[in-house]
Image (spheres, rainbow, N blue to C red):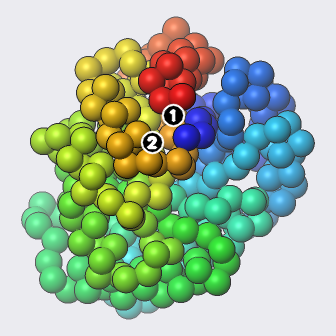
Amino acid sequence: MKLGLNTLLFTAGFDREHLPLLGQFKQWGFDGIEIARFAFDGFPAREIGQAARDEGLEVTFCSALTGAVSLISEDAAVRQQALDFLKQGIDTAREIGSDVFLGPFCAPVGYLPGRRPNEAEWGWAVEGLKTAAEHAAAAGVRIANEPLNRFETYFLNTAARGRELCEAVGNHSHGLLFDTFHANIEEQSLGAALRACGPYLAHVHACENDRGAPGSGHVGWAEVFATLKEMDYSGWVVIESFGARIPEIAAAACIWRDLAESPEALAREGLRFLRDGLV
């Protein structure tokens, strides 16, 4: 397994000005960096990807549907806008040198209509993701679609439901992202949830129950580690936490206190814990 760090711990939108961070991440011992972006126009993906590789870091790439951008909207024009966004994100992932494009890609984060998802929305998700998966296959990129907890989305909450979605899409280029923070809320067993992902498991986010450093809270890490080894998972396990002092990130993730002594401490302590448990 390879261990990475998501840039949302340090910035809401990684760009050229953040390139000096790359050397620090490598010095701390990470195998790779997960670049987060929510807009792609003008983003120097090739330059940043090469800068990371020059530091000895591999790159993964993440984003999310936000605002009114939805793959399951009743409005066909909005669904097309979401599909265009996903295609552009896939192309950007290819340009930056990532073989995975990951995030919640059905409904916008935080959209809660106060009801269960309906059959029409499921059909629109499958339809859009089939097209996105075909685009991803041609680009050599795999989508890792992320179930979120019930307080962030109503549409896709569990690994089992995520697997149903993958089976309906029917393309290996559409898989699942398993996130320990969300699973700690939604799943009855973290190990069973990981197994439910099966061959669709494309990426793992490691985060504590309070969004802090892995190992500092009550997530069932022994079960997570044992199951990943049992599954012969050889992909990425990436620390995903958020900068508590970055206003837009703190507001989006509802982080109203410091999660560690510093972002650097969170990253280094989390990496040490994951390496001890996984490598």
Which residue shows up at 71% across the image and 68% down it? Answer: 94
- Could you tell me which secondary element the residue under label 2 belongs to? strand
Quarter of the image where one finds residue 11: top right
Which residue shows up at 33% across the image and 27% down it? Answer: 221
Which residue shows up at 25% across the image and 57% down it? Answer: 196
Instruction: Tell me if residue 100 comes above or below residue 81 in the rendering.
Output: above
Q: Distance between the Cα atoms at labels 1 and 2?
A: 6 Å
Quarter of the image where one finds residue 154: bottom left
Q: Nearest the camera: 89 or 27?
A: 27
- Could you tell me which secondary element the residue under label 1 belongs to? strand
Mark 1: amino acid: Ile
For residue 38, say whether it is visible: no
Left or right of 266, for residue 16 = right
For residue 49, say whether it is visible: yes
Instruction: Tell me if residue 51 comes above or below residue 26 in the rendering.
Output: below
| Image spot of residue 274 (x, y percent) | 49, 25
| Image spot of residue 204 (x, y percent) | 45, 46
Left or right of 117, for residue 100 = right
Left or right of 176, for residue 54 = right
* Residue 205 tag number: 2
Q: Nearest the camera: 91 or 80?
A: 91
Left or right of 56, for residue 264 = left
| Image spot of residue 15 (x, y percent) | 76, 47
Location of the C terminus (image quadrant): top right
- Count of marks placed on residues: 2
Q: Please name the residue that numbered disc 1 is placed on.
A: 239
Mark 2: amino acid: His
Label 1 with label 2: CB-CB less than 8 Å: yes
Instruction: Tell me if residue 100 comes above or below residue 132 in the rendering.
Output: above
